[in-house]
Image (cartoon, grey):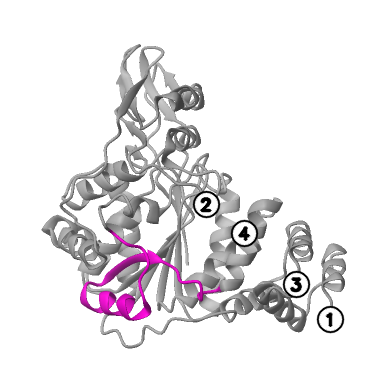
Amino acid sequence: MNAVDLIVAKRDGGELSDEQINWFISGVTTGEIPAEQAAALLMAIVWRSLTARELATWTAAMINSGQQLDLSSLERPTVDKHSTGGVGDKVSLVLCPLVAACGAAVPQLSGRGLGHTGGTLDKMEAIASWRAALSDDEFLAQLQDVGAVIAAATADLAPADRVLYALRDVTGTVASIPLIASSIMSKKIAEGTAGLVLDVKFGSGAFLPDPAMGEELARTMVGLGHAHGVDTVALLTDMDQPLGLAAGNALEVAEAVEALAGGGPADLVEVTLALAQEMVALADLDADPAEVLASGQAMDAWQAMVAAQGGDPAAPLPTAKVVDHWTAPADGVINRIDALAVGVAAWRLGAGRARKEDDVSASAGVLLRRVHGDRVSAGEVIAELHTEDPSLLPTAHDALSSALTIANTAPEPRRLIADRVA
């Protein structure tokens, strides 16, 4: 076989055989297929897509490109969650210890942020001494003892995805439903969990703003999960406006802890509980996540999870040297705060990265003081802008210049959970 034949076949609308796909994924993983040929085939897939059979084979080959975790020794039922990402999405920080407190083992292998969407590992690393890298033995022991792990995936887990994602990121081939679905699901299936709940977001701050594309991605991923023996459910959730009040690493940790303590923004709690209920059902546990959250057991699990990974749950979180204000331009009622604009502002303040190798600021970000449905007066503070570098403030203000919609009448209530796919 040779890569040119695969590229030409897919470019012209043909189907790749199982043998061709397995050969390609193996060659990408070992480096035998050069980057330019791999990138060309990815672009052909963006243009021509993959059939259901091709996608199933492609995903299986990615799973088989490396290690698959074995969680069968655990006494707890296993269930995980994956979010397609958004602005202020700190749900995992509340959800993992909450579902662990309900009796499950939650093996959350997470990533870092890029662009306007925050990364769970970046948020957790705002906690003093917390570490993302765990050995397999540490990972399993913590799942058994605590029930929750938030950690970085090892290099041996679906290594083909690591190579392909890096290529997609620099070749304009990210926005493809089959490639997105296989990237996410290969890692989650290789993780070894019995159940999986997907939080597929839509709206301006989401990876796929169009709700129809979000639903297509959800159905594709649910189908892949079922095909590989993983009980999978997806919820489509709103990311047209930020989730919660905080966008930024330490700011989001503080908000998550507030939710674990029984407070927190209502939208964050609603989405978290909806996902928790799905996870508890997949794990076949007799527990009410809302009651467990109110009891304080989820906070206990959070503190145990952080401490098990070397962190100090009682340590003060980093705070920014500079706090500026974003104010309302007129009187009225807030009808919308654009999630993408807030995410870009947080990124420009130092909370995000433009390239994977960039550092992020733990203290930077945006903290909303007024939200959808609030009545405001001209000059009233809408948000605080937190940064270590005051020279970054002008570009953050530029990002927010058209983010706010103020009207004379109250908006319709937000519909946070739009649909369920099973």
- Residue pointed to by mark 1: 1
Mark 3, Cα crowd under 10 Å, few <14 / some 14-19 / many 20+, is some
- Residue pointed to by mark 4: 166
Q: Judging from the image, what secondary structure is the residue with disc 2 in?
A: loop
Gap between marks 3 and 2 measured at Cα: 24 Å
| Residue in view at x 22 percent, y 50 percent | 257
| Residue in view at x 58 percent, y 64 percent | 181
Q: Nearer the viewer, mark 1 or mark 3?
A: 3
141 inside magenta stretch? yes
Mark 2 and mark 3 in contact (Cβ < 8 Å)?
no
Q: Nearer the viewer, mark 2 or mark 4?
A: 2
Provide residue 377's location: percent of width, then percent of height: 32, 13
- Residue pointed to by mark 2: 357
Nearer to us in this view, 382 or 230: 382
User: Do we see residue 18 in this rendering?
Assistant: yes
Q: Nearer the viewer, mark 3 or mark 2?
A: 2
24 inside magenta stretch? no
> Which of the numbered marks, if any, corresponds to residue 33?
3
Q: Judging from the image, what secondary structure is the residue with disc 3 in?
A: loop
Stretch in magenta: 130-158
